Amino acid sequence: MSVSTKYELKLGVATREAFGKALVELGQKDPNVVVCDADLSKSTYTNFFEKEFPERFVECGIAEANMVAIGAGLAAAGKTAFVASFSAFVINKGFEQLRVTAAYPNVPLKVVGTHSGISIGEDGPSQMSIEDLSLACNLPGFTVLAPADEVSMKACIHLAAEIHGPVFVRAGRSKAAIVYTPGTEFHSGGSHQLLDGNDVAIFANGLLVAEAIRAAEALDAEGISARVIDIYCVKPIDRDAIVRASTECRAIVVAEEHLKDTGIGSRVAQVCAETTPCVMEFVGLTTYAESGTPEAVLEHYGLMAKDIVAAVKNVLARKK
């Protein structure tokens, strides 16, 4: 799939809302789908499913660890079980249960963490999950997905239901720019090259995909050709796309709304180190963020298109 640099990135719904709508679609098709939430159904949008299928919805209260164990039990019993809460809660508070009741026995539990990253804004650092992708990737057997928009979120939720193993899906609070057209295919171990270019390859996911496209537009105006790749599947990662980028481009930049020490940047770098080492630059977080509007927080911590542009110029200067 390719996206023109003239593409208009219209604002769509938040990926958490797209998740809620996708759950209802799954529930209508499959009576085996069940959903658990931890007293946040209006925020995670699992209330959509609860309204349609109250007999298949389990409200677990403010007890994320218990919710994970309950969901794993339902999955072990043959249900297509989804559990949802803020990423900071379901991953951090539920990690031991994710490890023992889902990862170790390879139970096909589907875990959705909403309000990820720092773009939850005013909710503050206690609820900003900037470690979730790293922690999820550290669970053996887990597939880890981080969709960029409403189209990819719906597709990834349907994909998660089909995967024969545990899955973590990252969702955000803020409305996301629409990158994909309905019907675009997503699969485990996949990525999508959205723009072609040979000077630099920009890998991103989540909200940073749209920022990467905006950065590529700005770079194109300066005569710099940027390839943009949505690495929506963090684990298993698309090694072929990374190898192609590291061999066909002069450098790589990775942009993510996550700790850059342990996020997709480290995973991309590992593949490069094993196959085709190249010059790299990383756009991401090094600290917990302060509270503020989503726009102000992303701006303050350097997660905008202009920051990706600066990283590209830095890495190309080093390449010389």
Image (cartoon, rainbow, N blue to C red):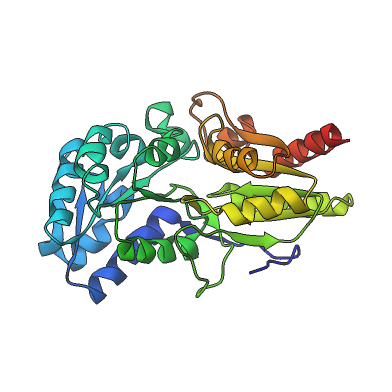
**Which residue is at a point 83% across and 32% down the rendered structure image?**
318
> In this orientation, does residue 59 appear?
no
Residue at the extreme front of the image, as rendered: 275
> In this orientation, does residue 266 appear?
yes
Residue 285 lies in quadrant:
top right
Above or below, 76 relative to 53: above
Residue 195 lies in quadrant:
bottom right
Q: Quadrant of the N terminus?
A: bottom right
Q: Quadrant of the C terminus?
A: top right
How many labels were placed on the picture?
A: 0
Above or below, 110 relative to 287: below
**Which residue is at a point 61% across and 62% down the rendered structure image?**
10
Left or right of 314 on screen, residue 320 = right
Residue 146 spot, x, y in % from top left: 47, 51
Above or below, 57 relative to 271: below
Left or right of 12 on screen, residue 82 = left
Residue 275 spot, x, y in % from top left: 64, 44
Residue 152 spot, x, y in % from top left: 48, 62
Q: Nearer the viewer, residue 105 or 257?
A: 105
Q: Nearer the viewer, residue 288 or 272?
A: 272
Residue 238 spot, x, y in % from top left: 55, 54
